[in-house]
Image: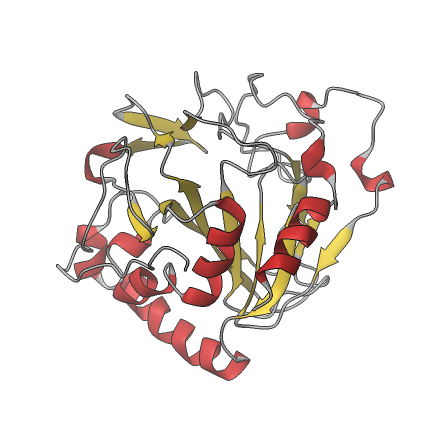
Amino acid sequence: MDLETDKKTFAEQGFIGPFTLWEPEVMTAWWKKQRAALLDPRNKERAAFDNPVNYDRHLDVPGLSQIITEPAIGRRMQALIGDDVQCWRTEFFPKSPGDAGTGWHQVETYAIGEASEGMLEPTARSEGTPMELTAWVAFTEATKENGCMKLIPGSHRQWRYDETAKIRWDNTKKDNTFFGYDYSELRLDKDWDPDDEDVRHVEMKPGEFIIFTARCIHGSNPNTSRKQRMGFSIRVVPTHVRVYGGMESFDEFGHHFDLSRHGVVQVAGEDEFGFNNVKRENAWGEPFTTLSRSA
């Protein structure tokens, strides 16, 4: 694990990888078990949110509780964002045959759609250090044909979208939106076309992952194949970032989310700020693993 090279590449591109977490056959067998666990009514009763989006299932599915602190992912995150890291959200990104591509978008505080404020509030800034990261893990094969991710290298260094502007969710819009939010409405330069840039299509085998900042403009291709693509995002922040500060609930993608059962997970280091409610164990009483600070 060459963390210095990772840091240099990330500074240039806004993302690093793909890297291997597990070999394809290991991930395929593991994912089969997790699919069953996701449908288990005992887990669903303990889930943080009652909605079809499946946010934060790492809080109730033991296998997902473990993957968020895998050292291959966590150590790279620490190198990029600092020793003290909290997971504030996980989510699934399925793409079934015939599904449209996800439109280009760029965010940082996750002030998505009609939100009155961002979900993430940094209390400190350090030049060159992101305030958020996402690890996108391929649970299945991800190819150009079945809807792999696409990113624009270096785009994290310039804002091309106004994240603070409001857009309405419209589920009738399918093509080139962010699940019903049309980010093309937020482009600062209406004549700029992201497809004219140096687009990187990131194909992955099952068990591979990339790490990127959501400030790096990204999207995904449509699924023109006969196979489903499944990705899983692990979203993290340094501990100086307030998560859902003062919010009791939020509305997103046409659903209502009650935050009364939400909490962050300390995936690495320590929490010296105490801004966020930290979950020490999952819904089954099993403690979360916390990686140590780097040596």
Q: Residue at x 59, y 67 (%)?
A: 19
Q: In this view, does 119 lie to the left or right of 165?
A: left
Q: Is residue 203 visible?
A: yes
Is 237 in front, or is 194? 237
Quarter of the image holding residue 289? bottom left
Q: Is residue 79 left or right of residue 218?
A: left
Q: Residue 188 location in percent, x, y?
A: 73, 19
Q: Residue 178 location in percent, x, y?
A: 59, 37
Q: Residue at x 45, y 24 (%)?
A: 118
How many numbered callouts?
0
Q: Which residue is drawn at 63% across and 64% down?
A: 18
Q: Residue at x 33, y 51 (%)?
A: 269
- In the rendered view, would you say 210 is above or below 235? below
Q: Can residue 93 be seen in this view?
A: no
Quadrant the N terminus occupies: bottom right
Is 103 in front, or is 41? 103
Q: Residue 216 location in percent, x, y?
A: 65, 40
